[in-house]
Structure formats: C-alpha cells, structure tokens
Image (tube, rainbow, N blue to C red):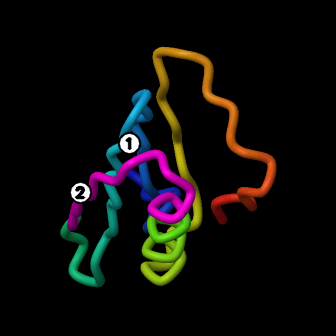
Amino acid sequence: MEVLYPRWSGLDVHKRFLIACLSCVQADGQRHKELRRCSTMTGEVLALKAWLKAAGCSHIAMESTGVYTPPPMLPKMC
C-alpha cells in the first residue's frame, strides 16, 4: 500500500475531552502511533497543536458525534 501522508493525526472529539492519535511512518517502513488525551479547554488544545506541529503532522482527520465549533480565537490546527 502506498503511503500518502507519512505523519498524520486522527482526533476523536467529545464534549469535555479529545483524544489524538499521531501516526508516523518511520524510515524502516514501520508505523509508530502515539495517543494523547486533553481537555477541550483552549490552553490544552493549543498544547496539543504544538505537539502535532513539533512532530511534523501534516494532516488531521476529526470525528465528532455532536456539533463541534472551535472558539473564534483558536487558530487553525496546522
């Protein structure tokens, strides 16, 4: 299978927290996954953004069972 995005993240958004899975394909072709959980408070979401950017994450897929509207002061994730 061809790798389209070697570093990406999936977000599962809940009312009070979200879970992020960062997936990275390493030089040897092995996939490395790392999970993080944070609250939906702005400070923690911004820390999550910093973690994803530092890891070189290029794409994010988000799943939410409800309506998710980011706060207006929150910049784009990537």
Identify the residue position indicated by label 2 in the image.
35
Task: Give how far across and how far down residue 58 sits, in percent.
Answer: 58, 66
The part of the image, by quadrant, that contains residue 78 is bottom right
Q: Please state which amino acid type lies under the numbered disc 2.
A: Leu
* Left or right of 73, for residue 49: left
In this rendering, the label closer to the viewer, 1 or 2: 1
- Please give the name of the residue rendered at 34% of the width and 60% of the height, measured from the top-left corner: 22
Q: How many marks?
A: 2
- Please give the name of the residue rendered at 23% of the width and 57% of the height, measured from the top-left corner: 35
Span shown in magenta: 32-45
- Please give the name of the residue rendered at 43% of the width and 28% of the height, measured from the top-left corner: 15
* Disc sitting over residue 29 in the figure: none
Task: Give how far across and how far down residue 27 sits, in percent.
Answer: 29, 84
Q: Secondary structure at mark 2?
A: strand
Task: Give how far across and how far down residue 10 sits, in percent.
Answer: 42, 45
Whether 44 is among the magenta residues is: yes
Whether 71 is among the magenta residues is: no
Task: Please report whichever mark, 1 or 2, sits nearer to the chain's N-terminal start.
Answer: 1
- Please give the name of the residue rendered at 43% of the width and 58% of the height, measured from the top-left corner: 3
Q: Nearer the viewer, residue 70 or 10?
A: 70
Identify the residue position indicated by label 1 in the image.
18
Classed neighbour count for the residue bearing mark 1: other residues with Cα under 10 Å, few (<14), some (14–19), many (≥20): some
The part of the image, by quadrant, that contains residue 29 is bottom left
* Left or right of 11, for residue 71: right
Q: Secondary structure at mark 1?
A: strand
- Rendered view: 4 above or below 72: below
